[in-house]
Amino acid sequence: MHSSVSQRWARLLLPALVAAGAAVGIAGCASGTGAQDDGAAPPLSPPTSAVPLWPGFTPPSTPEQVGPAPGFVRYLPVDGVSAPADGLSGVSPKRLLDNDPNVAKVLQGALSGCPGAHCPLRKPVLRDLTGDGRDELVAAVDLPEFQRTLVQVYRATGRTVRPVLIYWGQLGVTGETYGRDLIITSTGDDGRTTVRFRWNGEVMAAVTPRGGSSTPDVAETVPGGVPAESVEPKRTP
């Protein structure tokens, strides 16, 4: 009797339990496709920015240059060479270098074979670099034995001829003019180097990045061990 009653209740409850389970499954599937609350959002990080080490430090201002521009002494005039009335176009650069007291003797010896197939002297170039209406003469001498090239610029003032630039650079330097500026470029172990020279009323001076000028560049080691002062500007007596 008791067993029959239990079986009867089981038959009545089973459909209800199945229906309830199906409803729970449907509700679960529906919740997966809707909005969900995943909790609090992660905090946002500020963008990376520079952080000064010394925020209270103010660098000192660069003082402006005051007073007259630095003076430049002249090179000595070339001995025994007078400029023709029409300028330096007809003057031999070898003659200028051979008689130039500012030139090292080792260079004058290297020119002993000029003119000739092995002459280290390049073809001279005439350009007005000073703005006086007369061309200056630009001479270059390549010296492979010293791995140096000498560039000299000569200027005629009346009948007097004197160099206004003596520059020892890497062997094989190239040059160009930009307006009245002379630009010399060399390539060596340290890469490409460009020096810009500009007439300052006395000599062709190297132009600094700030637009000022400095003394003409002279190589630290002069070919043949000649003292550096032999190619630096000298004061006219």
Image: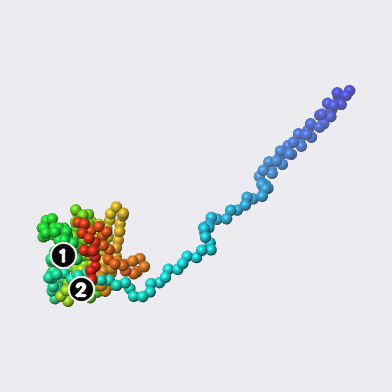
Kindly identify the residue that appears in the image at 20 percent across and 68 percent down.
163
**C-alpha distance separating marks 1 and 2:** 20 Å
Instruction: Indicate the quadrant where residue 204 lies.
Output: bottom left
Kindly identify the residue that appears in the image at 33 percent across and 66 percent down.
208
Kindly identify the residue that appears in the image at 67 percent across and 43 percent down.
32
Which residue is the site of mark 2?
A: 237
User: As drawn, which residue projects farthest toward the right?
Assistant: 1
Query: In the rendered view, how is the structure colored?
Result: rainbow
Q: Amino acid at mark 1?
A: Leu
Q: Position of residue 195 (x, y in %)?
A: 29, 63
Q: Is residue 177 at least partly visible in the picture?
A: no
Which residue is the site of mark 1?
A: 97
User: Can you say which quadrant of the picture contains the N terminus?
Assistant: top right
Task: Give the crowd class for mark 2: few <14, some 14-19, many >=20 residues within 10 Å.
Answer: few
Looking at the image, which is closer to me, 3 or 142?
142
Q: Position of residue 122 (x, y in %)?
A: 17, 61
Please report whichever mark, 1 or 2, sits nearer to the chain's N-terminal start: 1
Judged from the image, the secondary structure of the residue bearing numbered disc 2 is loop
Up the image or down, 136 lies above or below 10; here it is below
Judged from the image, the secondary structure of the residue bearing numbered disc 1 is helix
Kindly identify the residue that appears in the image at 32 percent across and 72 percent down.
70
Q: Amino acid at mark 2?
A: Pro
